[in-house]
Amino acid sequence: MSSFLSISQQLVLMIKLSYQRLNHFYQYISLKHQLIGLSTVMLSIITLKCDAQIKGNGCDFGGRIAIQYLGKATYYGNVSDVVEVYSTSSAVPINKGNGRSYDCGAINDYDEFQVWNSSIKPYGGFITVPASHDIRRNPSSRQHECVVASSRYATPDGEGTIVGYTYRDPNKCTSTRPDNLPLDDHFSFLVVITGVISLPVIRKKLI
């Protein structure tokens, strides 16, 4: 009888050990899936952020930048003066600040400034709006660089200089203009929050 009980106890012990090993393996797989899922979410955020950015060169003709390139043409018929032509209808406004924060759908170009926020307790206070310089200006010796027109050979509606630009795709903006901030301003905050939330889960799985 004692021998039979000993064998039974051994079987029970083996079953418990097998269950514990399977449970640890399941926890490892679960942790791995969670880490993969977290990485996928963060990568998706980065990808969406990159996809929402529009970059290129355009014609800055005062307060707006035309971004659709139509080709080259002579400057008012002067064959020795060739300029780049951009579509007038493709012009994107430039937000130069003046009390307005980041304008989603505009090309933002302003220094850091402060605005009054009445929601700050108890009596309101100033908040700092970070600088946003999304225009790259390159010095040029050309007298005439670009014009804007309805078509390549149409009479120009204006003229300006060639600049590089970056701005958010207005079709992917998350709120109406002009007070929403780009994801870049909150990205580090999102990473920290995600890490804080996931840390207790990861520690629990590893213990």
Image: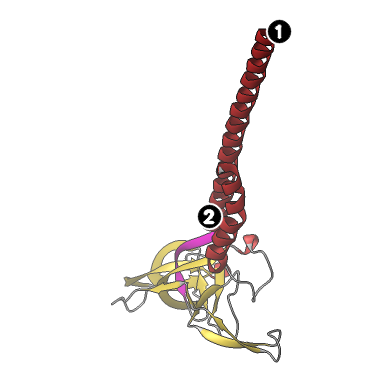
Q: Position of residue 63 (x, y in %)?
A: 52, 80
Task: Kindly identify which numbered label has been placed on residue 1.
Answer: 1
Q: Is residue 76 at least partly visible in the picture?
A: no
Q: Which mark is residue 46?
A: 2
Q: Quadrant of the C terminus?
A: top right
Q: Residue at x 60, y 69 (%)?
A: 105
- Magenta stretch holds residue 58: yes
Label 1 environment density (alpha carbons within 10 Å; few <14, some 14–19, many ≥20): few
Q: Nearer the viewer, residue 199 or 3?
A: 3
Residue range of the region highlighted in magenta in the rendering: 52-60
Residue at the location (56% across, 65% down)?
189
Three-letter amino acid code of the residue under disc 2: Ile
In the rendered structure, the answer to whether residue 118 lies left or right of residue 47 reads right
Labels in figure, total: 2
Q: Is residue 162 above or below residue 199?
A: below
Asked whether residue 103 is drawn in magenta, I would say no
Alpha carbons under labels 1 and 2: distance apart: 67 Å
Q: Is residue 97 above or below residue 205?
A: below
Colour convention of the picture: secondary structure
Asked which secondary structure carries label 1, the reply is loop
For image coordinates 57% across by 47% down, the residue present is 202
Q: Main secondary structure of the magenta part?
A: strand
Picture disc at residue 158: none
The answer to whether the residue labelled 1 contacts the one labelled 2, judged by CB atoms less than 8 Å apart, is no
The picture quadrant where one finds residue 140 is: bottom left
**Lower sequence index among marks 1 and 2:** 1
State the residue in front, 93 or 151.
93
